[in-house]
Image (cartoon, grey):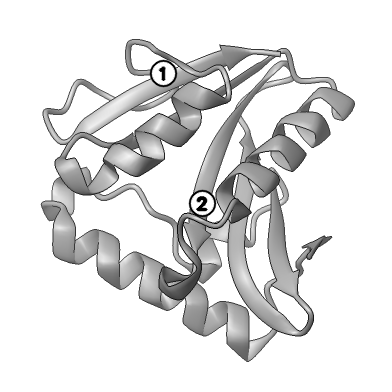
């Protein structure tokens, strides 16, 4: 498997992200959905990676610069047929390493609070993320959980 910086121009990643946003909207009330669509991810403060197994897109994730020292994990997704195979861990380790290389000292995230998101929360816990209060522009929300990690 390889992890590449993706410019978000290909039809495969567009479809992959569309499926992600549709899934998040089907699981979470509209006011609590924080998933970014393709245009939302095409910002200078965001670095986006795709995970490829050969030529097959199997995962993606991004970091969004919040300030000079703090970044946010965004758009983590593994292909539904490839879950529980280490892709999320591989990508998260890469994103943590790249965040450190970029000079960030803290990495935070928002994820869902329901049972569906339990595997994601366990993944983040496994990689050193602790629960925290809302950060950046987030507010307390019963549908959201906030986590952070010092780098």
Residue at image location 51% in from the left, 25% down from the top: 126
Where, quadrant-wise, is the C terminus in this rendering? top right
Task: Left or right? Give the position of 57 relative to 15.
Answer: right
Q: Which mark is residue 62?
A: none
The residue singled out by tag 1 in the image is 135
Question: The residue tagged with tag 2: helix, strand or loop?
Answer: strand
Q: Residue furthest bottom?
A: 11
Sort mark 1 into few (<14), some (14-19) or many (20+) by Cα contacts within 10 Å. Answer: some
Front position in the image: 46 or 48: 48
Residue at coordinates 34% horizontally, 37% vertically from top-left?
111
Place of residue 99 in the rendered image (x, y in percent of width and height, measured from the top left): 76, 30
Q: Is residue 140 left or right of residue 96?
A: left
- 101 or 68, which is in the foreground? 101
- The answer to whether any part of residue 110 appears in the image is no
Which of discs 1 and 2 lies nearer the camera? The answer is 2
In-front residue for pair 59/62: 59
Q: x%, y% of residue 107?
A: 60, 23
Residue carrying label 2? 76
Q: Position of residue 134 (x, y in %)?
A: 33, 18
> Which residue is at the far right?
101
Image marks 1 and 2: residues in contact by CB distance under 8 Å? no
Q: Is residue 132 above or below residue 145?
A: above
- The residue sitting at the front extreme is 85
């Amino acid at each position: 498997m390889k992890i590449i910086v993706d410019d978000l121009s290909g039809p495969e990643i567009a479809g992959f992200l569309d499926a992600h946003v549709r899934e998040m909207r089907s699981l979470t009330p509209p006011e609590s959905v924080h998933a970014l669509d393709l245009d939302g991810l095409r910002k200078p403060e965001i670095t986006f990676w795709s995970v490829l197994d050969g030529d097959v897109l199997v995962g993606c994730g991004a970091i969004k610069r919040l300030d000079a020292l703090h970044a946010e994990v965004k758009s983590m997704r593994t292909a539904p047929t490839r879950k529980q195979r280490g892709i999320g861990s591989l990508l998260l380790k890469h994103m943590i390493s790249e965040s450190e290389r970029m000079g960030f000292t803290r990495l935070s995230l928002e994820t869902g609070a329901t049972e569906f998101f339990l595997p994601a929360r366990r993944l983040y816990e496994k990689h050193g993320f602790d629960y925290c209060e809302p950060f950046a522009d987030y507010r307390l929300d019963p549908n959201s959980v906030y986590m952070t990690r010092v780098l």
